Image (cartoon, helix red, strand yellow):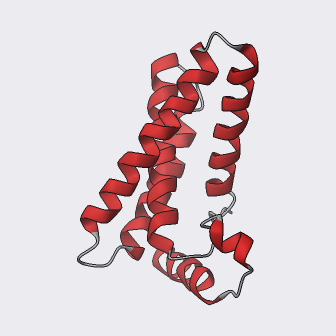
Amino acid sequence: MGTICIGLLVLCFTLIPVGQAEARDGLFGPPLPFFAGCTGRLSALMEFQWLIGAPEAAQTAELREEMVLILDAVTPPDGGREALSLRVSAKRVHWALLTTAAFGTDPDRAVQAQRRADHLIRGCTDRLLRS
């Protein structure tokens, strides 16, 4: 059943016609960059939650595992390096946002970083099929 859901999700991402603005956001372009980025972001969030002892870490870990399954499904046989590179890059950037939000000395910048981090994660998790 999970494989069917993943397949349907991938099909939706590849067949839906979109405007230029949506394509630029990476939501409906090639699925590999989107899902690799989301996997990296969720990894950063999960590890940050572990660091600060947030109880949401377990739920984030489950979401990350779902994203890993989708990423594995959309990664071509020769795309492992690209996927890993995209994951690491997104994780590094998201970690920086979370660090700025939690430990930044400029309150306005900290709020902006938290909003951006939340927005990016929502952009990922809103696309997961949840029951």
Is 20 displayed left or right of 84 in the figure?
right
The structure residue drawn at horizontal position 54% and vertical position 41%, both measured from the top left corner, is 60
Residue 35 x, y percent position in the rendering? 49, 63
Is residue 33 depicted above or below 37 in this figure?
below
The structure residue drawn at horizontal position 63% and vertical position 23%, both measured from the top left corner, is 101
Is residue 91 depicted above or below 105 in this figure?
below
Furthest residue to the top?
A: 105
The answer to whether one can see residue 1 in this image is no
Residue 99 x, y percent position in the rendering? 53, 23
Is residue 111 depicted above or below 119 in this figure?
above
Is 77 displayed left or right of 97 in the figure?
left
Task: Pick whichever, 61 or 109, lies toward us.
Answer: 109
Residue 68 x, y percent position in the rendering? 41, 59
The answer to whether one can see residue 106 in this image is yes
Residue 48 x, y percent position in the rendering? 49, 27
Is 52 displayed left or right of 77 in the figure?
right
Report the label total: 0
Splitting the image into 4 quarters, where does residue 56 fall? top right
Task: Pick whichever, 29 or 73, lies toward us.
Answer: 29
Splitting the image into 4 quarters, where does residue 131 fall? bottom right
The structure residue drawn at horizontal position 68% and vertical position 21%, both measured from the top left corner, is 110
